[in-house]
Image (cartoon, grey):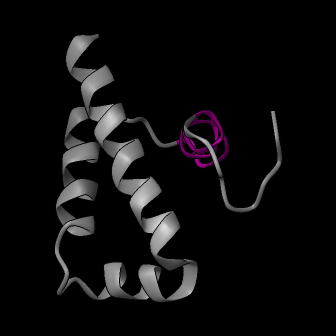
């Protein structure tokens, strides 16, 4: 698996979250993260966008939405 510091694909992001960080992509976790990411007033979301840029932010939204779909169909 690619050892990118900042994942550039869904597979790399999923590996980073589930394997490296040991976080299960449960429906509850995914919903919490999507709610935070979609809240423009959330200070962590604002900081993330400032530090990592809009492209990475949009990728995160897409990846969490995909993980949500996969969790719902599992």
Q: Is residue 7 above or below residue 52?
A: above
Quadrant in the picture for residue 61: bottom left
Name the residue rendered at 68%, 61% in the picture. 6
In the displayed orientation, state which residue is furthest to the top: 74
Number of numbered discs visible in the structure rendering? 0
Residue 26 in view of the camera:
no
In the picture provided, is 71 more to the left or to the right than 62? left
Location of residue 56 in the rendering, given as x and y in whole percent from the top left corner: 52, 65
Q: Is residue 18 above or below residue 45?
A: above
In the picture provided, is 7 more to the left or to the right than 66? right
Q: Is residue 31 magenta?
A: no
Magenta-tinted stretch: 11-22
The main secondary structure of the magenta stretch is helix
Name the residue rendered at 78%, 54% in the picture. 4
Location of residue 5 in the rendering, given as x and y in whole percent from the top left corner: 75, 61
Residue 55 in view of the camera:
yes
Quadrant in the picture for residue 13: top right
Q: Is residue 16 magenta?
A: yes
Q: Is residue 65 above or below residue 45?
A: above
| Quadrant housing the C terminus | top left
In the picture provided, is 37 more to the left or to the right than 5? left
Q: Is residue 35 above or below residue 50?
A: above
Quadrant in the picture for residue 68: top left
In the picture provided, is 62 more to the left or to the right than 35? right
Location of residue 43 in the rendering, given as x and y in whole percent from the top left corner: 29, 88
| Quadrant housing the N terminus | top right
Location of residue 46 in the rendering, given as x and y in whole percent from the top left corner: 34, 86
Name the residue rendered at 29%, 41% in the picture. 65
């Amino acid at each position: 698996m690619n050892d990118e510091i900042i994942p550039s694909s869904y597979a790399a992001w999923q590996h980073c979250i589930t394997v490296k960080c040991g976080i299960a992509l449960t429906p509850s976790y995914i919903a919490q993260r999507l709610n935070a990411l979609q809240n423009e007033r959330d200070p962590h979301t604002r900081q993330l966008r400032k530090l990592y840029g809009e492209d990475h932010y949009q990728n995160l939204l897409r990846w969490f939405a995909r993980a949500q779909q996969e969790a719902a169909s599992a």
